[in-house]
Image: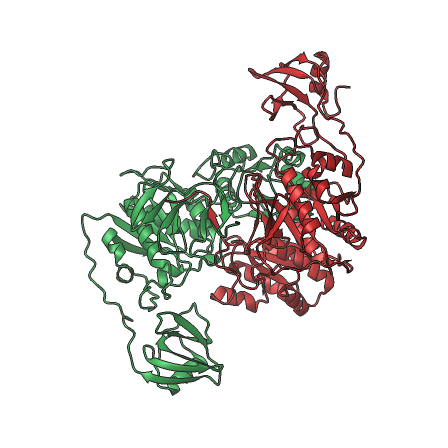
Chain colours: A green, B red
Amino acid sequence: MVMPGYRGRIERILKRASVKVGDKVKVESRGRTYVGVLMPRTDLGDPNHLVLKLSSGYNVGVRVEAATKVTLLESGELPRLTLPRPEIVQDPNKPLVTIVGTGGTIASRVDYRTGAVYPSFTAEDICSAVPEIAEIANIRVVEACNVFSEHMTPDLWVKIARVVAREINAGAAGVVVAHGTDTMGYTSAALSFMLRGLFRPVVLVGSQRSSDRPSSDAALNLISAVAVAARSDIAEVTVVMHGTTDDDFCLIHRGTKVRKCHTSRRDAFQSINEVPLGMVRNAQIKMFRDDYQRASQGGRVRVQGKMERRVSLVKVTPGLPSNVIRDIISSGGKGIVLEGTGLGHAPESLFDGLALAQRRRIPVVMTSQCLWGRVDMNVYSTGRDLLRLGVIPAEDMLPEVAWVKLMWVLGRTRDPERVAKLMLQNVAGEITPRTRPDVFLRPIFEAK
Amino acid sequence: MVMPGYRGRIERILKRASVKVGDKVKVESRGRTYVGVLMPRTDLGDPNHLVLKLSSGYNVGVRVEAATKVTLLESGELPRLTLPRPEIVQDPNKPLVTIVGTGGTIASRVDYRTGAVYPSFTAEDICSAVPEIAEIANIRVVEACNVFSEHMTPDLWVKIARVVAREINAGAAGVVVAHGTDTMGYTSAALSFMLRGLFRPVVLVGSQRSSDRPSSDAALNLISAVAVAARSDIAEVTVVMHGTTDDDFCLIHRGTKVRKCHTSRRDAFQSINEVPLGMVRNAQIKMFRDDYQRASQGGRVRVQGKMERRVSLVKVTPGLPSNVIRDIISSGGKGIVLEGTGLGHAPESLFDGLALAQRRRIPVVMTSQCLWGRVDMNVYSTGRDLLRLGVIPAEDMLPEVAWVKLMWVLGRTRDPERVAKLMLQNVAGEITPRTRPDVFLRPIFEAK
């Protein structure tokens, strides 16, 4: 067998050349020549490419066509295709951290040094791949689900919340949730609202770069996340990801104030409207603030997992017609979050639809598509008109977080006044009481 | 008459105290005492407040209740309630700049020194209020419409485009469009696509702070915008707004790459995924780049204003169901822009709806809710699934800009292949060919 992963044309070409994974080969394709070690293919890769590890250490995907020529240069073995499985010694002096797998890249592809790919997800695999974490804590690994994060659902949030609660109630010092980055901010918000009485750290972590590349952020992120879970006194749901593009430090973001702000950079995750809680460098934690929930030794986490699924997030655009609201209501919608313009505005063309929502007692919550800053619907007449239509101004809540919260609030009550009250009550740090004026962004490029 | 603007209870209380606008008064309300000059009320203010200019120069709104007491301290006149209307001398050596009013704050409240409020909008008013602009250019003022920008519509974009084209074709050196900030980025994108054969600068400008406050950004923004219209060689639609929170300099943003990123800060407008074109300090322009369309002396601007209104912008959320797409299609929708997750992903639950759109030949365009970075749908299997469903990856286009562009493209053609081709063709700088890795944001707060 060449290697599970290569199929069809590539498998035939490799067989013809008597090449197996681990061999050093020459590949001639589209007029270019590549020399490197043939790597196993992963499900994440393009099935029309084979993967070579170049002498530089970088992996490259080479497109294989009918005319592509592969030549064996030297037989070889992948350095550590089967990892040695060290007996994990449970050190009674170390805290126990549970890593909950959900299917993100970080969980399935953790060996960042050899480029080898591990579909399995055991404590042994992870500790072998990133041995630093075993120095911080005794590691236990459980799987809650196995999906790319773009396919995460509210049902899976509940499942993850239950696993996290179970682990903490069973004595884990902290829990790390390994999660794809696409919707990590949604899941961190959902866990923040669902986990009531949280008394230990819960840390979401992911990886922006595949861990089979030397530039991967997986190892530093995982080490830092385990450090926060094992050593911090933050009894909140947080997201721990790279603070810069250097493999330098990670930032600790509150789970309700964080957003993926870049499709590919390692420092894509940013706290919005507040300073991050702290940072992690060399597995050492430095807090920037002291307004967070402190961990304690005992307690009991409960999961308030009931969520109203029929809540819509509507981005306001110029001239948005009222039938958008009417369609949501006639499809059985139970709540609407608007991503309004500026201080929390929507066009007059939407007012009829909003009046209908008000008559039907369907709560409508206002956030801002600016993302930074705070909704203030008392400044202009449009805002006051919207307040009269019963629209609930969601302070400085992120639109996505307000959407998750409204699902959760409607799982508690249907009474419009109680919904409004709960939406404006600070349940999990989602509302910053006072915005620091210096919490914004500036372009990295500098105007001179 | 006390003053147009004060009505009901406030008018009665002011009459009883024989107080008129311009008088120095003492107001006792809710246990606090305020002393200042009574200012005229504007339509933008809360009808239950009166406005005092304190000796500090700041205006304050004081809530008036039944028990509020107003006492006349000293009769007075507002310093320049009726501005002297200087004869504007047309200087043949200066370029002509047309300021097009659309109804934004900047146009209607320009006297930033006295706090006086001018509902009218004439060249004389503006030149009196911000005399610096008359030193830069001969100013002509026309009104295209008069709405808050949250009520701007695609129909009004066309109207503005026609006025701009008329002014340029009639010989204006450049045009400034005074616009509310809420939807300025949408209008700047729309004008960028509609104005074909543009050969002079078109500059959108607005104000984040009311111009009756000393901290207003209106004057610097307007001066800088007129400077770009009169003196720059940028034959593109740009947005000129504060570069920092200091009254220091303005940045020149390309009209298709700019976004309002803060509800209230003066530097809310930021170029996304590219370096701004340049900056303006003391009405002097400094360019950062040379990849822009150069102005020329002659030419003819045409307006391609046909827009397909039935285009939806859908923000992707976890578990988003296919009936969202079905509802859009059954309501007669002709195009959809998705604000996907990460590199351009959507959940499996949406695939049925996307397959329906594909069968009905309704184009679906993918952007990223990360905002920064670029859609890449070849990295993960979800992206490749979406490509097979005919989804068009919109490179690094902002979601709002892709939405405007799809309306414009569908005004040209209904053929799905031509739509896809035009969406990926760089019409007005909306696609950055190569992303500079340093074009991102960093929090203003510094991690140590």
**B130 or B165: nearer the eye?**
B130
| Vertical position of residue A362 compared to residue A244: above or below | above
Q: Is residue B165 left or right of residue B263?
A: right
| Vertical position of residue A306 compared to residue B400: above or below | above
Q: Position of residue A376 (x, y in %)?
A: 58, 35
Q: Report which quarter residue A173 is drawn in.
A: top left
**A117 or B143: nearer the eye?**
B143
Q: Quadrant of the N terminus of chain B?
A: top right
Residue at point 46%, 40% (across, down): A430
| Vertical position of residue A11 compared to residue B425: above or below | below
Q: Is residue B141 left or right of residue A74?
A: right
Residue at point 68%, 32% (across, down): B44
Q: Position of residue B5 (x, y in %)?
A: 73, 25
Residue at point 66%, 32% (across, down): B112
Q: Quadrant of the C terminus of chain B?
A: top left
Q: Position of residue A372 (x, y in %)?
A: 52, 43
Residue B69 seen in render: yes
Q: Position of residue B255 (x, y in %)?
A: 64, 53
Q: Is residue A330 left or right of residue A68?
A: right
| Vertical position of residue A406 compared to residue A178: above or below | above
Q: Report which quarter residue B137 is drawn in.
A: top right
Q: Report which quarter residue B408 is drawn in.
A: bottom right
Count of all numbered marks drawn on residues in the image: 0
Q: Is residue B309 left or right of residue A100?
A: right
Residue at point 49%, 40% (across, down): A409
Name the outermost residue toward the front: B93
Residue A334 seen in render: no
